[in-house]
Image: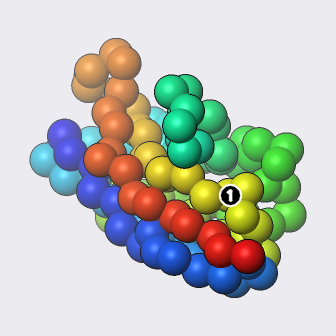
Amino acid sequence: VQLVESGGDLVQAGGSLRLSCAATGTFATANAMAWYRQFPGGTKRELVARLGSEGDPENAVSIEGRFTISRANAKNSVYLQMNNLKPEDTAVYYCYATFPSGAPAGYWGQGTQVTVST
């Protein structure tokens, strides 16, 4: 299984970006799909938003009302629509997913850089 992200870019504060992540190498529908981010100089990845195959999303408080996670299960893809971006949103954004009968620890994408300038 591979997760391939795209959509990261340099944007001015107040702007918008849409991140995409597609899972390849499997016919199984992902259980949970999520976006995490790692801030510059940081070593930990924090949860941005998570969405199961069904049900409501789980969002970090810091992005509530600005970011929206969505999925296209038929494409095994997950998206993150980011609006009203702030400089403190600057980070590498990673896609994460778990699959039935897949690796228990799940799978990570390679990351996509989002930079928000003032």
User: Relative to 41, is 84 on the left or the right?
Assistant: right
- Which corner quadrant holds the C terminus? bottom right
Image: 100 above or below 79: above
Asked whether 105 or 73 is in front, the reply is: 105
Q: Give percent across and percent down for residue 24.
A: 19, 53
Give coordinates of residue 94: x percent, y percent. Answer: 44, 47
Query: Image point 63% across, 70% down: which residue?
Result: 116
- The residue lying at 41 percent from left, 38 percent from top is 97
Corner quadrant of residue 113? bottom left
Does the image show residue 27? no
| Amino acid carrying mark 1 in the image | Asp
Q: Nearer the viewer, residue 49 or 37?
A: 37
Across the whole image, how many numbered discs are drawn on residues?
A: 1
Left or right, 111 with respect to 25, comes to right
Check the image and name the residue furthest to the top: 104
Q: Quadrant of residue 76?
A: bottom left
Q: What residue would you read off at disc 1?
A: 89
Residue name at image x 54 percent, y 45 percent: 40
Tell me the residue at 55%/52% (across/down).
91
Q: Secondary structure at mark 1?
A: helix
